Image (cartoon, rainbow, N blue to C red):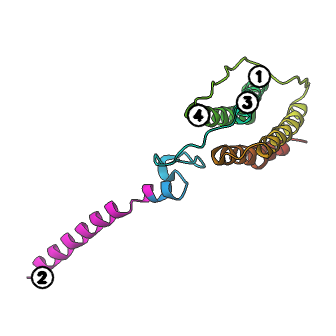
Amino acid sequence: MKKTITITLFAVLIISLLVASFAVSPVQAAYDSGRRGPTGNRGQRVLSQSTTAVVLTDQEKIDLGEAIREEYTAMNTYLGISKEYGDNALFARIARSEQQHVNALIRVAERHGVEVPENSGEVAEVEWTTYAEACEFGVKFEKLDAGLYDELLAKTSNPELVWVYTRLQSASLNNHLRAFETCLP
């Protein structure tokens, strides 16, 4: 009798858990709250399929292309510095992050039918002779990057662009800039 009650309670518990997991999965809750949850894509916004895209103005399209080109330049420059210093982890890591910035901007461009500029291989005009000078350049470049997003944000009303530009600017100021500041002597 006791065994039957235990088995019944166990079965009810399992069924309750299954029903609850279908009602609200942690992954879905994370998506709904704007996070990607355990998928590892922190900070990337998921737009629901029911979201209607707001048409970009001609200026917003031009500015989006400018943002993509700037992120390409940052990525190319940091990769060059990384190779100069034997694939230094800091510059290589930030170059990978710049590639993620490019990818985020390209996704927006593709969603809106905006032609994506090619990576021309352009690098920033910078000269350095020491690792510390390269870090100083990184500090200056990230401040310029944040300034560009200030300019772009002032010219856009598209909520998707505002969201992406704000996130990229925050990454520049709160992650990249801080990392470069820590490598200064």
- Residue pictured at 80% horizontal, 46% vertical: 154
Q: Is residue 24 magenta?
A: yes
Identified by mark 1, the residue type is: Gly
- Residue pictured at 61% horizontal, 39% vertical: 55
Q: Which residue is mark 2?
A: 2
User: What separation in Å lies between label 4 and label 1 (alpha carbons)?
Assistant: 32 Å
Q: Is residue 33 magenta?
A: no
Identified by mark 3, the residue type is: Ile
Rendering coords of residue 87 (x, y %): 72, 26
Q: Can you tell which of label 1 and label 2 is closer to the viewer? A: 1
At mark 2, the secondary structure is helix
* N-term mark: 4 or 1: 1
Task: Out of 104 and 151, give the one closest to the viewer.
Answer: 151
* N-term mark: 3 or 4: 3
At mark 4, the secondary structure is loop
* N-term mark: 2 or 3: 2
Q: Which residue is mark 3?
A: 62
Disc on res. 80: 1
At mark 3, the secondary structure is helix
Answer with the quarter of the image where residue 7 lies. bottom left
Rendering coords of residue 131 (x, y %): 86, 31
- Residue pictured at 74% horizontal, 34% vertical: 59
Task: Out of 178 and 159, give the one closest to the viewer.
Answer: 159
Q: Are marks 1 and 3 in contact (CB under 8 Å)?
A: no
Q: Quadrant of the C terminus?
A: top right
User: What separation in Å lies between label 1 and label 2 (alpha carbons)?
Assistant: 71 Å
Q: Can you tell which of label 4 and label 1 is closer to the viewer? A: 4
Q: Can you tell which of label 2 and label 4 is closer to the viewer? A: 4
Q: Which residue is mark 4?
A: 112
Q: Residue furthest left?
A: 1
